[in-house]
């Protein structure tokens, strides 16, 4: 009967990310890509805005409005707000009232525990989902880029999201070795903000820190000369308490990003140490695939190549790999039964 019901509903795959949430509708592709941010009224907790509109309020909202990121380090930190966000995403993705509530495949971090799994399922079911399937983000990313996860050969994926970095060696539809660390794009943004605060006594918001990272951030020199680049940064002077502008160089931002970048490299090494020799040989031949928004940091592939002595391949569109992989699982649930964490029916 599940095939019949799916004809009457818009079954969907969701990459429920710390920074961004993407929705894939069966037969249509990716229909939504929104920041994982919700604005609510203090006290009543009534939802005011979700996604881009809510993100625009970060650091700018009056006292009676609270702007919340309901996911932290890849797991739900605020159950009620996460449920409201999911409901908004599902409603907007369907565009019309479906006859039957949808089935949904949701990608979750590889290190999620049972409590985290339950909170994701409960939030999705309360938001109007009929049936919930969970798949690990690195496995979804591997499927999304077309790696042969069902075969006995080893495939290694590094998925760098907003809150977590998931590293996994995948073979025969399972993770043979995996590491999940609470380091991602958010940690990098925080490192930039802390550097500006300590060096210049300048307080900047998380959106300003992210903009600096995107504009001049890097993990390693990308050219032999690697000429220094500077940008103007505006914030509040912590001593005088008034707005101030300073100029910051790309070299010092690279220095500020050293710690989170090193933690990612250490996670890759730990995963390689736990990989069986036969699969390690496959990785030497195939290299490592890097996905997720964090993989767009300049020079990160060069840095990891230097630390591991292995080829590092950044995919063409790293931001959509996870949701596209979850979408492939949704399109052929029977084929991908083995990659699902658990199947739950209401």
Image (cartoon, rainbow, N blue to C red):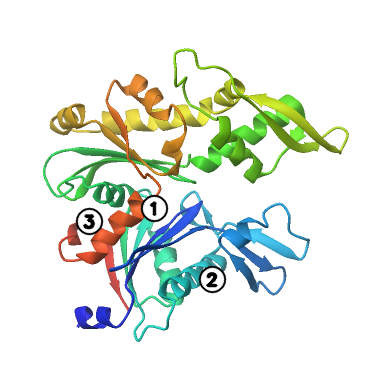
Helix, strand or loop for disc 2: helix
Mark 3 element type? helix
Q: Which residue is mark 2?
A: 84
The answer for how far apart the CA atoms under marks 2 and 1 are is 21 Å
Q: For this rendering, which residue is in front, 273 or 317? A: 317
Q: Nearer the viewer, residue 310 or 180?
A: 310
Using residue 288 as the reference point, say whether residue 303 is left or right of it. right
* 3 vs 1, front mark: 3
Q: Earlier in the sequence, mark 3 or mark 1?
A: 1
Decide: is 33 above or below 234. below
Marks 2/3: CA–CA distance: 28 Å
| Quadrant where the image shows the C terminus | bottom left
Residue at x 59% of width, y 26% of height: 253
Q: Which quadrant holds residue 105?
A: bottom left
Where does the image place residue 340, in percent across and percent down from the top left? 25, 59
Residue 236 is marked as none
Residue 220: image location, x then y, percent: 46, 22
The image position of residue 251, as x and y in percent, is 58, 20
Image spot of residue 143 (x, y percent):
24, 50
**Location of mark 1 (residue):** 112
Disc 2 or disc 1, which is closer to the eye? Answer: 2
- Look at 45% across and 39% down and name the residue there: 294
What separation in Å lies between label 3 and label 1 (alpha carbons)? 15 Å
Furthest residue to the right? 240
To which residue does mark 3 refer? 339
Is 179 left or right of 198, judged from the image as shown? left
328 up-or-down from 286: above or below: below
The answer to which of marks 2 and 3 sits earlier in the sequence is: 2
Instruction: Estimate how packed mark 2 is, as few (under 14), some (14 to 19) or many (20 or more) residues with alpha carbons within 10 Å.
Output: many
């Amino acid at each position: 009967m599940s095939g019949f019901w799916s004809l009457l509903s818009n079954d969907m795959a969701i990459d429920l990310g710390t920074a961004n949430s993407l929705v894939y509708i069966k037969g249509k592709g990716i229909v939504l890509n929104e920041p994982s941010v919700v604005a609510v009224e203090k006290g009543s907790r009534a939802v005011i805005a979700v996604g881009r509109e809510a993100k625009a309020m970060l650091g700018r909202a009056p006292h009676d409005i609270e702007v919340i990121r309901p996911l932290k380090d890849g797991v739900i930190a605020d159950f009620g707000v996460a449920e409201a966000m999911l409901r908004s995403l599902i409603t907007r993705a369907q565009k019309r009232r479906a006859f039957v509530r949808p089935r949904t495949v949701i990608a979750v971090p590889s290190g999620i525990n049972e409590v985290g799994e339950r909170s994701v399922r409960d939030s999705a079911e309360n938001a109007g989902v009929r049936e919930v399937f969970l798949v690990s983000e690195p496995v979804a990313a591997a499927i999304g880029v077309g790696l042969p996860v069902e075969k006995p050969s080893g495939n290694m994926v590094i998925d760098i999201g907003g809150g977590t970095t998931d590293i996994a060696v995948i073979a025969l539809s399972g993770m043979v070795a995996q590491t999940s660390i609470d380091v991602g794009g958010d940690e990098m943004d925080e490192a930039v903000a802390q550097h500006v605060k300590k060096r210049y006594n300048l307080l900047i918001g998380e959106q300003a820190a992210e903009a600096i990272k995107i504009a001049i951030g890097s993990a390693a020199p990308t050219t032999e000369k690697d000429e220094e680049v500077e940008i103007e940064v505006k914030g509040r002077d912590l001593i005088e308490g008034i707005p101030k502008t300073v100029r910051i160089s790309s070299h010092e931002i690279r220095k500020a990003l050293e710690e989170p970048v090193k933690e990612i490299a250490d996670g890759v090494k730990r995963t390689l140490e736990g990989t069986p020799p036969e699969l390690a040989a496959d990785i030497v031949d195939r290299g490592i695939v890097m996905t997720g928004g964090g993989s767009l940091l300049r020079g990160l592939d060069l840095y990891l190549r230097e630390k591991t002595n292995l080829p590092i391949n950044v995919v063409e569109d790293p931001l959509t790999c996870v949701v596209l992989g979850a979408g492939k699982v949704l399109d052929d649930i029977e084929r991908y039964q083995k990659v699902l964490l658990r199947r739950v029916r209401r």
